[in-house]
Amino acid sequence: MAAYETLILDVEDGVATMTLNRPDKLNAFNTQMMKDMIAAFDETDARDDVRVVIVTGAGRAFCAGADLSAGAETFNYDARSAADQQARAGTGGVNRDGGGLLTLRIFESLKPVISACNGAAVGIGVTMQCAMDIRLASENARYGFVFARRGLNPEAASSWFLPHLVGVQTALEWCYTGRIFPAAEAHEKGFVRSIHAPDDLLPAARAIAREIADNTAPVSVAITRQLIWRMAGAAHPMHAHQADSRGIQARGKSGDAREGVTSFLEKRPPNYPDKVSQDLPDIWPHWTRPEFS
């Protein structure tokens, strides 16, 4: 397992827990955290012993947004170090948004991603969760799309993700006002699945992870994640029909499908033989990843 500067990655019994680990800075996001999180998702995708990823924060915050230690020049890419600029290099002289680099990587994850929001989640701390699959909140969680209050615009591709989750009206209100709102409002508007006492948050996230890890075929889950997220922006249901038809054809003759039916008929837990690292079929002949321009 790789060592990371700004997070801790633990894997136990099929579940990876990624803990943002700058508690003295309220887990504020910087270039190193961006690099670490992207690398950690590369690792969890590559490991067949990882079935589900849970993301949480150390201390009393999930992630309090961007690290503001550079003061007024925090968001001025021209004032950043050469290494920081290189990490965000785009085309045509445009530096890519670091939050977007992260959420686009989460978008491509082959493993389900559960967020266990334990405290403050502001700016990138909340927009990164938009790209995660299932969001749980502590009673202590607070959220804020504060960009307009900092003279900025929403980032991390949240203008695509957020309206898919809560609708255009709520997304605009949250982003227009930039106000901090409690977990209860996030739950009411459908941003989070459920709210938990602080000590119950991670156990609740792990219970969902166990339901996935103990009962489902990893390759099927990876395909399902791709289908749901990619089709969220499809122009016509035919695109979904093209992809899921190829998936059913490939998976229907797999060892996983045979095991899924046999274990059900024999009333025993399944033991799926296929691995995401080597048995994931290509069902996307019509899919082209857009280039940054």
Image: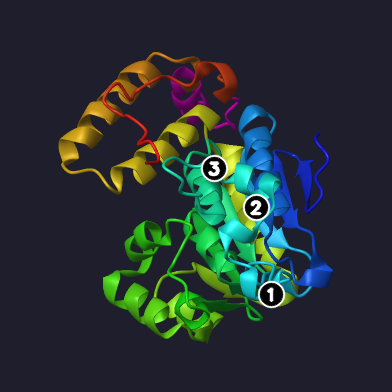
Q: Residues within 10 Å of mark 1 (few under 14, many from 20)?
A: few
Q: In the image, what residue occupies the spot 54% across and 59% down?
A: 128
Which corner quadrant holds the N terminus?
top right
Q: Which residues are magenta?
A: 257-272
Q: Is residue 258 magenta?
A: yes
Residue pointed to by mark 1: 71
Circle 1 or circle 2, nearest the eye: 1
Badge 2 marks a residue whose secondary structure is strand
Q: In the image, what residue occupies the spot 41% across and 42% down?
A: 92
Residue pointed to by mark 2: 54
The number of discs equals 3
Position of residue 53 measured from the top left corner of the image (x, y, whole percent): 63, 46
Is the residue under label 3 in contact with that under label 1 (CB below 8 Å)?
no
Q: Earlier in the sequence, mark 1 or mark 2?
A: 2
Residue pointed to by mark 3: 89
Which amino acid type is shown beneath numbered disc 1? Gly
Q: CA distance from mark 1 to mark 3?
A: 22 Å
Q: Residues within 10 Å of mark 3 (few under 14, many from 20)?
A: some
Which amino acid type is shown beneath numbered disc 3? Ala
Residue 186's place in the image compared with 113, above or below, is below
